[in-house]
Image: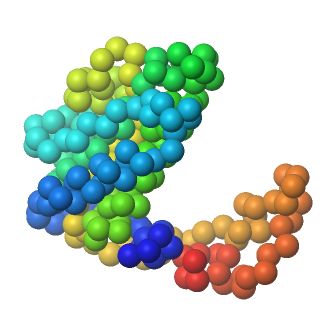
Amino acid sequence: MDYFEAVKARHSIRAFQKKPVEEEKILRIIEAINLAPSAGDLQAYEVVVVKDPMLKGKLAKAALGQNFVSEAPVCFVFVAYPGRSSKKYGRRGSELYCIQDAAIATTYAMLAATSLGLSSTWVGAFDEEAAARAVGATAGKRPVAILPVGYAAESPENTPRRPVSDIVSLDTSGVAYPFSFSDERSRGRPGI
């Protein structure tokens, strides 16, 4: 699947088949994560791959009772490492760049999973301290995202999107970008 097909095919999935994710696919996702760009190429994050049912249960509880987290065959937990980034970038590194690094890595994982025929959803609503405890993140490290991954057991409809003209400006905020593609293409996934 090429990049644009993966972007079009990706949906937030919260129901998974009781089918394990093949180790080779997990390794391909990890490879994609490792290729994600990061500030200063520091990769100021860690990824914890969680397969243990008890730990997934703790993550679901930390995720405010979002039980689909525990039902996914595997969860990737992205943990920002502020200390790694602050050594080079100071406060901006510890407060922003490490979070961006983890977010970019999460996005790479989502798209890699989609390209491999898997599904996921980004979970950002969780008790940070409980999630950190669940995966043994040491002090100073901050969970940023939980990504449950598996084979979809649902097929949601495409969600509506804002028109591109509402989110893209040319040179200055609020200045309309002169689009050359159809309005239908700018409103949703078809035509990416």
When the figure is inspected, residue 154 is found, relative to residue 95, above or below; the finding is: below
Q: Name the quadrant containing residue 135.
A: top left
Residue under the point 56% across and 32% down? 40
Q: Is residue 184 left or right of residue 177?
A: left
Q: Report x, y in % for residue 165.
A: 77, 68
Which quarter of the figure has residue 130?
Answer: top left
- Quadrant containing the N terminus is bottom left
Q: Which residue shows up at 57% across the image and 71% down it?
A: 160
Task: Estimate the x, y position of residue 23 in percent, counting from the top left.
Answer: 14, 55
Residue 80's place in the image compared with 1, above or below, is above
- Locate residue 188, reporting x and y percent: 59, 75
Closer to the camera, 141 or 152? 141
Q: Residue at x 71, y 69 (%)?
A: 164
Q: Is residue 178 left or right of residue 64?
A: right
Q: Would residue 122 be seen by someone viewing this image from the given angle?
A: no
Q: Quadrant of residue 72?
A: bottom left
> Can residue 96 be spotted in the picture?
yes
Vertical relation: 16 (above or below) 101? below
Does 99 appear above or below 133?
below
Q: Nearer the viewer, residue 85 or 191?
A: 85
x 14%, y 60%: residue: 22
